[in-house]
Every structure is written in structure tokens, then in C-alpha cells.
């Protein structure tokens, strides 16, 4: 029976392991074995939620206009009409709802305009220098978010990130590109690379 050196055996084993790693996609604990990264997220219209701040203008009614914050339960409290449940509504839906409530006995033909002035924060964690909560700005990309958090650690996977949207039940594997967008309330997790 031929004798093989331990070095030859380890070399063959290492080659086999490297070949196996190249053929298996990196999979998160939440993903199935055959999942691969999605290249881009589908853009949807922004919906309001806790910690959003809005500027609301009721035309010809300056005392009813102003800046309002969505509370932790998803409500905005406004003069005359009281609390409105805005959690999950788009800005346009909120405008129509506020007009209906003002028209129900308070104002004749009210016109309401609203815009989000401060979005809820996003969160970044994992293989990043300064994980934490950061303020959202329009047009924010994952690369901007990573730079704000002072960059990757040396163990970071620089090709794939995990992102969980505020309304998502799970996080999704996203291919990291310069154009990968962040939405308000997102949780970004920079995963560890294997080699």
C-alpha cells in the first residue's frame, strides 16, 4: 500500500475545499440553499411610519398648518381633526384622508399639501466600523451608508449585503453596487466573507 505524505494529503484536501466553496453560493441563515443575491430592490412609493416628520399646509388656514411628527404608534395629531392613523399610508393618501376629515364638519373644500421633511433613520450593523442608527437623506445608497459608518472591517463581504425593509418579514441578499439604494427605516447588515 503506497504511503502519502501528510503535506500531499492536505494539499489535495485544500484544493477540494476551495473548489467546493466556489460552486456554492453564499447563503444567509434566512435564505434557502439555492438562493442567490438579487441585484436591485424594487422601488415602491414611500409610506409613512413612526419618527417621520411632515410639513402639512392647509391652504388659507395657517393656524392648522405646521410640522407634525408621526408618533411611535403611527399617528399624527392635528388641530381640529385630532389623531390620524397614517402608518403605511403614502403622503398622497394622507393628504386625501386629512382633506376628508377637515371636510367632515370643519372646512369647506379643504386642500391639504404634505411633504416629509425628516425621514425615519436607517440602521447599519455587522462587519462595519461604526454600527448604529443614522439619519436618512434623499438618494442615500448603501455605499454612502457604509462610508458614513466609517467603512468596512477587514472581514467584510464587499459584494453582498443583507437588507431588511421596515415592512419586510425577512432580510434579503442584495448585490452591492454603487447604485444600491437605502430606504428610510432599512436595516443593513454587512456580512462576513468566508475567505
Image: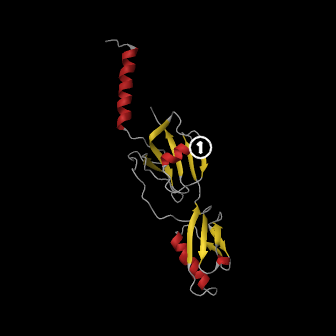
Residue at image coords 59%, 85%? 103
Residue 164 appears left or right of 106: left
Where is mark 1, residue-wise?
A: 131
Q: How is the image coloured?
A: secondary structure
Q: Is residue 177 above or below residue 60?
A: above
Quadrant of the drawing holding the N terminus: top left
Q: Is residue 164 above or below residue 70?
A: above
Residue 9: give x, y in percent of width and height.
Answer: 37, 18
Residue at image coords 40%, 47%? 37
Residue 194 appears left or right of 187: left
Residue 170: give x, y in percent of width and height.
Answer: 50, 53
| Circle 1 residues within 10 Å: few <14, some 14–19, many ≥20 | some
Residue at image coords 49%, 48%? 142
Q: Quadrant of residue 27?
A: top left
The foreground one among 109 and 75 is 109
Secondary structure of the residue carrying tag 1 is loop
Q: Residue furthest left?
A: 1
Amino acid at each position: 500500500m503506497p504511503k502519502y505524505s501528510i503535506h500531499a494529503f492536505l494539499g489535495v484536501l485544500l484544493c477540494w475545499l476551495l473548489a467546493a466553496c466556489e460552486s456554492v453560493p453564499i447563503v444567509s441563515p434566512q435564505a434557502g440553499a439555492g438562493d442567490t443575491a438579487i441585484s436591485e430592490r424594487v422601488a415602491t412609493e414611500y409610506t409613512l411610519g413612526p419618527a417621520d416628520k411632515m410639513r402639512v399646509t392647509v391652504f388659507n388656514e395657517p393656524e392648522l398648518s405646521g410640522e407634525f411628527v408621526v408618533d411611535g404608534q403611527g399617528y399624527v395629531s392635528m388641530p381640529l381633526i385630532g389623531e390620524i392613523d397614517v402608518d403605511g399610508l403614502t403622503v398622497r393618501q394622507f393628504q386625501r384622508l386629512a382633506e376628508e376629515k377637515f371636510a367632515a364638519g370643519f372646512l369647506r373644500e379643504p386642500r391639504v399639501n404634505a411633504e416629509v421633511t425628516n425621514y425615519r433613520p436607517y440602521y447599519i450593523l455587522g462587519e462595519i466600523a461604526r454600527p448604529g442608527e443614522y439619519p436618512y437623506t434623499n438618494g442615500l445608497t448603501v455605499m454612502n451608508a457604509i462610508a458614513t459608518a466609517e467603512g468596512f472591517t477587514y472581514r467584510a463581504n464587499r459584494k453582498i449585503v443583507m437588507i431588511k425593509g421596515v415592512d419586510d418579514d425577512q432580510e434579503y441578499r442584495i448585490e452591492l453596487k454603487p447604485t444600491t439604494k437605502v430606504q428610510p427605516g432599512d436595516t443593513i447588515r454587512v456580512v462576513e466573507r468566508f475567505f
